Image: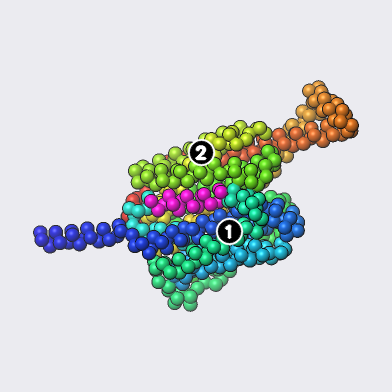
Amino acid sequence: MAATAAAGVVAARAVGAEERMDPRRLIAFLAMVVGMFMAILDIQIVSASLAEIQAGLSAGSDEIGWVQTAYLIAEVIMIPLSGTLARIVSTRVLFSVAAAGFTAASALAATATNIEQMIVYRAIQGFIGGGMIPSVFAAAFTIFPPSKRNVVSPIIGLIATLAPTIGPTVGGYLSHAFSWHWLFLVNVIPGIIVASLTWTFIDFDKPELGLMKKFDWWGLFSMAIFLGSLEYVLEEGNANDWFNDTHIVMGAVAVALGALVFFHRAFAAEFPVVDLRAFANRNFTFGSLFSFVMGIGLYGLTYLYPLYLGRIRGYDSLMIGETMFVSGLAMFFTAPVAGFLAGRLDPRLMMGIGFAGFAAGTWMMGHLTADWDFWELFVPQILRGCSLMLCMVPINNIALGTLPPERVRNASGLFNLTRNLGGAVGLAIINTILTARQDFHYARLAEHVQWGNPEAVDRLNSMAANFDAYGLDGTTAAVKQLAAMVQQQAAIMSFGDIFLLLTALFLVMITGVLMISKPQDGSTGGGH
């Protein structure tokens, strides 16, 4: 009995030691979170300020989109690679070098004098910055005990969703208050601090330099072609009329060939560049699927709201940012609530509530009109922000919480990749449907706005008389204005169609949640 009591005391002390967090590791983790915030923020920080960058660099309208596309293509290659690199050189070296490189690339982007330089610097920034994102997820699930994950997960979920949401707000403010150069200079001082702190305090793991001899270079090359070409096709497809464009066809061929070689190497190589065995874990597979859908919702709505406000309401980047800030505030205040609920509710219930809230918000947006302003968008944005947080926390826990520690580093890269690919696929589909539905609605409306319709003729005559009173060619001006009104209504109807499709998608996700079994507790290790 004495021996049993002694063993119990030792066990209790061990648990207590595990529960007490090393302050050095806490500092390191917080620094990593800031680094991840910067890397994700920079995806969207330029989106509301592309016009200012285009003017500053004298770039063409067909070139300026590459300021964002180059970053996304480079980042999507690095994210799954980061797990392997962390094993080889250690998390400390990977993260601190990534933070320093990201900072240097940000400073270079601010000095760009032409569009070619900017595209190169943005690609470097995206590639190096991509190494910081999965490392934070991996650190959270390896250095923190399971009992702390309901505190840590909301922090990570908040950063992963808040950063792209407030990107247009931050970017719009910086470019208005200062100049577009500050979109990149704002990273410099935090980047230096993050690089210094992570180099000093990270001690989670040791490098395994011997793995470099087994490194699968063919796997890396094929993955870069596969993911890079896929991102290019998805980003540029709609603007270039998809497969009617030679470059899109070549990109699609590169996707197919790259995927063929990559998946062969992933299963045949002794030390594959990406270990796909994490998908054997049922929780991870479902978590990745939900993450993919959340990517569609997160990046899709971050794109649709500013597009509506700019195209229909005529808002500038600062006004768009101020309107969009509601979602960010909703996320910020929901994060601690999500953490509290994560320890008390079945994660399936939390996700179900989150998906239902998201569907409610997009259903409301399906009734959009040209008059909708800040207050009409207020409730849908709150539903969006709160629902994102309620979904992200249990999704993170389900996907990574039951994997063995040695798998988490690699799996976190795959998990983050699914969110980014969801965003890319979602934006490609959204843009394609927007274009097709706008043409459809314009054709239907134009059938009624013609000379055989007395109401249309009366409206045209009234407008023409008004223009004539100002000494203009009334008939010509009235026809132009009427055509613009029809075009605007067609655009609004196409927005409504997209929001209703997103509603249907998130309602389907509720059924998906009901179909999975109750996830095991995070402490159970690598359960399936």
Q: Residue at x 73, y 32 (%)?
A: 444
68, 244: nearer the viewer: 68
Q: Position of residue 81 (x, y in %)?
A: 51, 65
Residue found 77% across the figure and 28% down from its top: 448
Question: Which of the two labelled residues, at mark 1 and mark 2, occupies the earlier sequence position?
Answer: 1
| Magenta-highlighted residues | 151-166
Rendering coords of residue 139 (x, y %): 42, 61
The residues bearing labels 1 and 2 have C-alpha atoms spaced at a distance of 30 Å
Q: Return the residue at label 1.
A: 186
> Looking at the picture, how far across and down is residue 223, in whole percent?
57, 64
Q: Secondary structure at mark 1?
A: loop
Of residues 409 and 183, the one nearer the viewer is 183
Give left or right: position of 16 versus 127.
left
The disc placed on residue 104 is none
For the C terminus, the quadrant is: bottom left
**Looking at the picture, does residue 328 appear above or below residue 233?**
above
